[in-house]
Image (cartoon, rainbow, N blue to C red):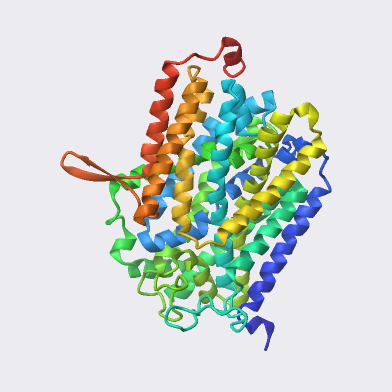
Amino acid sequence: MDIIDHKGLPQLIIILLYLGALLALGLFSSRLFKGTKEDYQVASHSIGPFLLLMSMFGTTMTAFALVGSSGEAFKEGVGVYGMLASSSGIIHSLCFFVIGVKVWKLARRNHYTTQIEFFRDRLQSDFIGLLLFPILVGLVIPYLLIGVISSGVVVQSLTAGLSPDLFPVIGPDGNPIRALNGGVPTWLGSLVICVVVLVYVFFGGMRGTTWANTMQTIVFMILGIVTFYVIASKLGGQDGLMANLKALGESIPENKSTRIEMSKMKFFTYLLIPLSVGMFPHLFQHWMTAKSANTFKVPLICHPIFIMIVWVPCVLVGVWATGSLMPSKPPLPLIPGTNVVNANAILPFLVNTQTGNILSGLLAAGILAAIMSSLDSQFLCLGTIFTNDVLTHYKGKENVTDAQQVLYTRLFIIAIVAITYGLGLLKPPSVFALGVWCFSGFSALFPIVFAALYWRGLTAAGAISGVFAAITSWSVMFYQAVQQGTLRTFVLELPFGGETYEVMPVVAMLLSSLVTMIIVSLFTPKPSEAVLARFFD
């Protein structure tokens, strides 16, 4: 049988070739490594506008944006785009301008590489570092899990049919699940992706990560557009893109094509979630790679446009899968052992069933590119935080050479990759739900970073109490959601004026952090004028 006609094999070959290209790029970038901690962690502040745009956009557009948005659109409808994509386009750029540029200026002046270094110095508090370290790591690991889980699902879905005898996937009725049967197992796909990312981050550091992010962002944007066009043509069955879009739009049920069943208050309170980018530790590290403040101009302008290019196709593909034009054979993939549709597998399923083997292999590489462009930054970020804010800080900078700091960063990256992969082997929840909770935690900490940059009256006690309030409220509501089995749908129901309003948990988290921080800061000793003079012109 011809290789091209062998189901699953062409996709696997293309995926392996793409991963090989990434490894080669990462190893090549290591040849430019200067051997210093600064070069490994922030690329010696040498990144220009185009690379900064691509690396920042790539690290924010994760499996949450591609795989998760398609899955959630399948469940909730087209309103998912308004909840996160359109608001993110505006709020992300606003955070880059309001937080990123000012952070870059202060960090370059005072030689910070991590958020914790900034907060510790701004508040003259060692405890704030001890408090933030486990919280930031704890919130980033679920973010990493999104990528690890999704990569395994994508590889399995897009290599289905490769070897049914070696990799069988049986449904609850005892029959093979065609959409997954014979595909590379999720545990193996996730393992390969983790190893590839680990290798080029290990050797290339921030420069290798930035170059890889740029390549992957270009790949998944171009192939995303191709995916959209091909699937629309296949499902629509009309002549011309516009005719296909019209036919597909008319095929979508009313409850999926409008926000008719979506609470207005829930919709608008989602707008607070994109504030999370202001506290992403991996984004902070990318800000520090910029050559100058002017380097931020291109990302500020282009980021919202890029979000639209990526999110629109993904959300539309998700709602098309609910329409009458969706073929009944093969059936939609189910979560193994259940009769529930696996929403995380909707996008790779359509790619695999509605395109040819070669094209679906290329599109598989595009989806994996989006996933991996976030994993690498997050792995490097956690290694940097551990080295700078724990080991070097308490051992003393004078007692740790640059070579040792690079080594410790690499060792911690290996440990985080191993832990994340191990957690990813557990039964995965909704990618979208996991992402929303993770982002909500970062959003709850947004008042702390904003006040640290713009409010002279912020005190160490105020910031610490605000962090405690944020993480306590997050923990309580997350526990309630898990107990109720409503991780994906958990909302706060607030009675007011005889009506009940659904509010996203992030509102309570952010308000608890903000109010606590302000009240405690008003009644506790302020930082000295000498300290404030270093942070406020």
Q: Nearer the viewer, residue 378 or 83?
A: 378
**Residue 20 is drawn in which quadrant?**
bottom right
Looking at the rendered image, the quarter that the C terminus falls into is top right
Looking at the rendered image, the quarter that the N terminus falls into is bottom right
**Residue 294 is drawn in which quadrant?**
top right
Give the residue drawn at x 80%, y 49%. Answer: 30
Give the residue drawn at x 70%, y 64%. Answer: 18
x%, y% of residue 331?
A: 43, 78
x%, y% of residue 417?
A: 65, 53
In this rendering, is residue 501 above or below 71? above
x%, y% of residue 337?
A: 45, 73
Classify residue 392 as left or right of residue 442.
Answer: right
Q: Nearer the viewer, residue 88 or 477?
A: 477
x%, y% of residue 131?
A: 55, 33
Give the residue drawn at x 38%, y 45%. Answer: 477
In this rendering, is residue 448 above or below 137? above
Classify residue 83 as left or right of residue 419.
Answer: left
Give the residue drawn at x 79%, y 27%. Answer: 398
Q: Is residue 441 visible?
A: yes
Classify residue 515 as left or right of residue 455.
Answer: left
Q: Is residue 100 visible?
A: no
